Image (cartoon, helix red, strand yellow):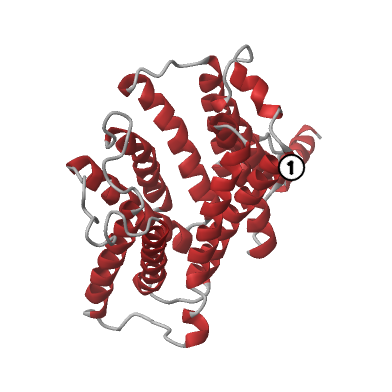
Amino acid sequence: MRWYIVASFLTVFTSSQGILTTLSQSNGKYKYDYATVPFLAEVFKLLVSSFLLWRECQNSPLPKMTTDWKTVRLFPIPSVIYLIHNNVQFATLIYVDTSTYQIMGNLKIVTTGILFRLFLKKKLSNLQWMAIILLAVGTTTSQVKGCGEASCDSLFSSPIQGYMFGILSACLSALAGVYTEFLMKKNNDSLYWQNVQLYTFGAIFNMARLMVDDFRGGFENGPWWQRLFNGYTITTWLVVLNLGCSGLLVSWLMKYADNIVKVYSTSMAMLLTMVLSVFLFNFSPTLQLFLGIIICMMSLHMYFAPPSMLIDLPPTRKADAESLIIDGSDERTDS
């Protein structure tokens, strides 16, 4: 399957994630424990990957599966990074408002490009760097409200701790993505075997979080496994399914494409969500939204289009040589 097809599916799944999550609420509140959703999504991804791995093992030759501890011990690290990242996100929201937090989240586009270059040694052209910066500018532009509104003034009035946590959050998000790509491309192991390892630790860490929540709440609502499906509706299950499918698509992109493709997919998904919100939730479209979409489309074209489509290249030497031969033959004919 070609990477742009997978990226398109990821864009659709990611954009519908926020919409489905909003629809799963009742009177603006969650009737279910939203901490159980990531856990069930990890279990879903683990089951799907295990089934696909079993199917792959039925074929000949058998897929490559590295089982030495030196390799397996690397797979819990992304879960640890995401765990730290989630706590940093909560700390950031203590100091900044939601609008500022969303805008600062676009820093991960640039930090992903930087870590992509430093740790994976992937060289980007000047045009591609310009495209990445344009993508960050475009997504930020689409989120900025009118400058007459109070939220615009609050963008630069937050404490310095909020900006520091925001930068740290962007770096951690990029680090988790880049490290995951490093893991997936470290060897020629089966994608499904790598997913089984990744999602096993993901499920364990999410289960640990549920247990910690029980201890913090003094088991007021009983242990987590007794309330696992409490308040679940069809829409809630769609949220779990959506989150699980998105994770599987991301792992495919990490294995066969790269982090920049994932960044573009999730950024375009954010714009698609805003456009769909206009029709589903009576969201008022703004001039900034349309400008942001135009800038992001320009960025997309700049990054992935061949350089010959973006600039006028000088004539090739072969063409110059042919013109010289023609001119020489004309001169001999005249003489």
Q: From this viewpoint, is residue 133 visible? A: yes
Query: Residue at coordinates 52% horizontally, 46% vertically from top-left?
Result: 263
Left or right of 298: which side holds 273? left
Amino acid type, callout 1: Asp
Q: How crowded is mark 1: few (under 14 residues within 10 Å), some or many (20 or more)?
A: few
Q: Which residue lies furthest to the bottom in this view?
A: 68
- Residue under the point 81% across and 35% down: 335
Observer-nearest of 135 and 161: 161
Disc 1, SS:
helix
**Residue lying furthest left in this view?**
234
The residue singled out by tag 1 in the image is 320
Q: Where is residue 244 in the image (x, y as percent from the top left)?
A: 32, 54
Q: Position of residue 193 (x, y in %)?
A: 36, 74
330 relative to 115 in the view: left or right: right
Screen quadrant of the N terminus: bottom left
Q: Relative to 329, say whether 291 is above or below.
A: above
